[in-house]
Amino acid sequence: MFQEFWLEPGETPKDIKGGFKKLMVNPYFATILTVVLGVLLGMNGFMKIWGLFGAANQLLAGIGLLAVAAWLGNAGKNNKMFLFPMTFMMIVTLASLVIIVRNQIGMIMKGGADWGPYAQAGIGTLLIVLALELAVEGYRTVMRGRKGGGDKAERLPDLEVEE
């Protein structure tokens, strides 16, 4: 599970000689760590970060629309039908995440907060940064596709509706 984070392109877990990196790419250790963290979260109040799951889910939908729009744009095909829903979903979800993070930081500043507001502020900030990075890269890809990316022979003809 953690191999994506610790291995270089083309490297396999068998290539690692030892140490912390070898432990992190071990599939048994990764499975046990994931299960233990899930059980701890379930036993210690998953409701404290439940609000982020909805935002993360909507963000994933927006990023999915972004991926399809970028792929179609890069292929030189019409992707206009994805641009408005994608933009709307990304803006609304990012605004929601900013509000969540702001509220959690406010709770932390008042004092006496347990681990929930810290986790929501940290994870929410991470989601915002990663989503903005993906949005910028997706926007560049979509714009590159509009400027002539993709082979013109591959483009689908525009469909005309007869009345």
Image: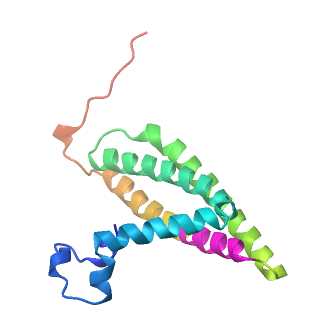
Left or right position of 75 against 108: left
| Residue lying at the far top of the rendered structure | 163
Q: Which of 89 and 101 is in front in this view?
A: 101
> To which quarter of the image does residue 34 belong?
bottom left
* Residue 119 located within the stretch drawn in magenta: yes
Left or right position of 135 against 88: left
Q: Which of 90 and 13 is in front in this view?
A: 13
Rendered location of residue 116, percent (x, y): 69, 71
Quadrant of the image containing the N terminus: bottom left
- Which segment is the magenta one? 114-127
User: Does the image show residue 4?
Assistant: no
Q: Which of 111 and 20 is in front in this view?
A: 20
| Residue lying at the far bottom of the rendered structure | 19
Q: In this view, does 56 lie above or below 120?
A: above
Picture residue at 26% right of the left edge, 46% below the top:
75
Picture residue at 26% right of the left edge, 76% below the top:
7
